[in-house]
Image (cartoon, rainbow, N blue to C red):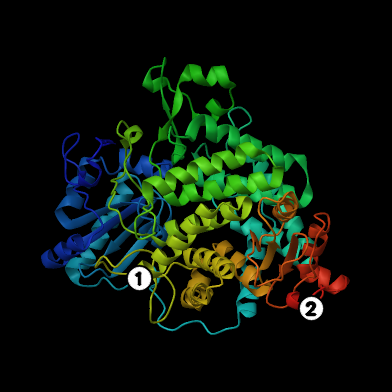
Amino acid sequence: MIKKLALGFIALVLNNTWAGESIHWQDWSASTFADAKAQNRLILVNVGHEGCTACRFMEENTFSNPAVITLVNANFVAIQVDSEARPDIGERYSDWAWPANAFMRSDGTHVLAFAGSRRPEPYMKVLREVIDGHAAGTLSADKLAPYGAAQVAESAPFTELRDQVRALQDGVFKDKSSGVFESAEPLRHLLLRNHLYGDSNALAMAKATLDGHLQQLDPVWGGMFYASFGRWGNVAPEKRLESQAATLQAYANAYQITNESKYKGAIENVDKYLTTFLRSKQGLFFANQQDNLVSLSVAPEKVMDMDDYYALGDKERRSHGMPSIDHAIYSDVNARIILGYVMAYEATGEQRYLDTATAAAKQLLADRQTKDGWIIQFKAGDELSADERIHVLTDKPVPYLRTQAHSGLALLRLYTATGESSWRQAAVQLARGLLSTLEDPKLGGFYGGPDDGTPGRRKPLEDNAAAAQFLYLLGVLEKEDKFKVAAERAIRAAASPIAVSREGKITGSLAMALEIITAGYVELSVVGDEKDSRTQGLLKAGRNVFEPRKLVHIESTGRYPERKAPAMYICNDERCTLPIYDPAEVPVQASLFTYLAVSTKSAPSTKSAASAN
């Protein structure tokens, strides 16, 4: 039942039989739900992705079982979703990842969901129970069904929300001894708290987890295994692109704060892996490397266990074959990779990291940014055509919030790191596209995807938080209040008590956004001729400062007075420094914009920049 895709055939692989009879998987669409309602048929939803071992197990053992196939086709409208191609649906079912299995009545009401794979007999038991309940009319709504969009905006002060989320995040890292590593934001949040407030406990928790994740790195080929279980070294032999992005971002911040070489080594390890195994010819990155071998010299039944495989050296591994690559290229996680490489450049000063980020970003914009500004999540490529897949893919070009939020953050960071206006222009265009396509004009906040006529549309908490961080900083840079207003509305519309409670541990992006907004931006503006070496010296000094809230750029005269020599002003809504002429003073003055500095040192001058001498 493994599906081999032909280029241009992506969205059509729905009802074909591949090896005898198979489940008649349908796309997630209004017409599919309408058919289920018209026929009074139950709905089965299976959500997963190619890098998921449990998903592959279920496909090869359960969904290929003749009895399961007969039972499903006779009683259900079966929907299959690739969580990476459809991040709006993937986010909705992430509580049950992966695979997520959900059941609905014919009207789209959720009645049951469970996580993980099932063997044929246990799975058929669930199917029969749902079928019997449907026949008896006893299927009731599931209280744990994915929550919908809140109808009332959250009104609590952001500081109160921030403290609530801090407590949630502290609970995640207390006594942590293993775990999934697919997002950098929780660790970056701890490091940011240390930077802003001198929170030594947050730093200790971050370092303990960062040191633990070092044991998930492959010392031979490089790359971060996506998870460990029970103890740090007990890894799942899968390498997912989001884990590589998380490593680049988290360890870049850690290296800047601590200057410990082991954290720089993690960046180098992942870069080696990405550029050797997952980079496409065009400079973007493939989705994952799976835990199954494409055998070169050994009979399939003798292919070795993947844990044993990764214990070998390079030559020995290759003699047994190579782990297969999922050649799909998803924009949201590529944006995370781009951001990670820019952060690696900022942390280490190594130009090759910025070059990698630049090449990927240029390709992403050239191939996937639409005339309306938003970026397409997925497009079929030549390298994908030979892949054997377990999930149906759709390449319908529609805007998804996750794609726009993370692409915006990457573009904004590229501009801050380089000063190249093209990145800033692309970020503004993307922001306008985001507001015009996905924002709720009444309540605020952003839907995960466009209204496609299917039930359960909602405003994803973490994706809204990422969008809020992007729009808040862009609004500061562009002096456009509409972006900053949209950022605040996004958090208030998405951070309902039920959403925060249900997401629980998965609130790293919300934590980051709330810390940045409540502490305030740090704008480092240079007034001076861009070609003047003194101007460039000040810009470089600003870019070298570790400050996750920063915006570094050249400012035209008018807002600040023009002086005899290029000068930098560091400002936020509360205060502004006197003009800075010496690059060596930049990190000193920037450090005063933390609450730790305010409590232990004299605060920066509150004298207005316009009147400063």
Q: Residues within 10 Å of mark 2 (few under 14, many from 20)?
A: few
Provide residue 611's location: percent of width, then percent of height. 77, 78
Say which residue label 2 marks.
606
**Which of the pair 271/125 is nearer the observer?**
271
Q: Say above or below: 207 vs 478.
A: above
Q: Residues within 10 Å of mark 1 (few under 14, many from 20)?
A: some
Identify the amino acid type marked 1.
Asp
Provide residue 370's location: percent of width, then percent of height. 35, 55
Residue 181 in sight from this viewpoint: no
Position of the C terminus, as image quadrant, is: bottom right
Q: Say above or below: 262 vs 580.
A: above
Q: Which residue sits furthest left?
A: 39
Residue 535 in sight from this viewpoint: yes
Say which residue label 1 marks.
142
As helix, strand or loop, the secondary structure at mark 1 comes to: loop
**Residue shown at 60%/76% (left/top)?**
161
Residue 313: assigned label: none
Q: Which residue sits furthest top?
A: 297
**Which of the pair 308/264 is nearer the observer?**
264
Image-quadrant location for residue 65: top left
**Which of the pair 88/140 is nearer the observer?**
88
For the residues bearing labels 2 and 1, Cβ distance under 8 angstroms: no
Identify the amino acid type marked 2.
Thr
Left or right of 201 in this view: 555: left
Image-quadrant location for residue 95: bottom left
